[in-house]
Amino acid sequence: MHPTLLILILLTISALNVANAFSTPGTNERVFVGTPVHKKRRLVSSCMTPLSSLATLTPSTTVDEAVTLLLDLGISGAPVIEPTSGKILGIVSSSDFLKQEAGDGILLPITGSMEEIEGYIEVAGKICAKKVGDLMTKDPVCLGAGESMRDAAVLMAREKIHRLLVVDDDEEGGKKLVGMLTSSDIMRDMVYIVKNLPSSE
């Protein structure tokens, strides 16, 4: 185990013991625990898969073609872009395909609030979709290439997602795809940080 991590664990245990010794019975006991500070925390641009190495789909790609491509590449999702401008239109993931495959067994209600009805219509559209443009999830969660990996991890955890589209704003105010970051990239960055913590020796 890395010396710095061992010290962090020992300090945390000591803090918990001190908190217990001086706490009042029946009160809430909380101790702040954080990750080690690392001055050279990397940016998203250093950890993402760049656009040049990224599989992308277009709205006109058929659902069958998309499934075949993702399976051949061993991935579970891909961004959907406008072919000429490169602007992001949406993202297709395994959850979208699951909704379509389960469509034969879904009974959609026809009552509820306007927001609920719009949600039912979206699900119905995915079930009947033949093209990626009708199956994709629109307005995917994005972040800039200059953001820190810590910010990316916080965003993924908050939104409960496993991939983020990395963008640069273009001159027309749109979002142009430059790469993609996944939860696996976050994990690799965590290993990188641990391996590069300053030694206590």
Image (cartoon, grey):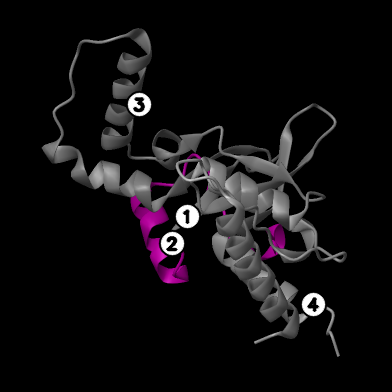
Q: Is residue 9 above or below residue 54?
A: below
Determine whether the residue tagged by mark 2 lies in a helix, strand or loop.
helix
Q: Amino acid at mark 1?
A: Gly
Q: Which residue is mark 1?
A: 77
**Do the residues under discs 2 and 1 have CB atoms within 8 angstroms?**
yes
Q: Earlier in the sequence, mark 4 or mark 2?
A: 2
Q: Which residue is mark 3?
A: 122
User: Is 109 situated left or right of 7 in this image?
Assistant: left
Region of the chain picked out in magenta, as a range: 48-75
Q: Which residue is mark 4?
A: 197
Mark drawn on residue 70: 2
Determine whether the residue tagged by mark 3 lies in a helix, strand or loop.
helix
Q: Is residue 172 above or below residue 92?
A: above
As measured in the structure, the alpha-carbon distance from the residue carrying label 1 to the one carrying label 4 is 33 Å
Q: Position of residue 37 (x, y in %)?
A: 80, 63
Please identify the quadrant where the N terminus is shown. Answer: bottom right
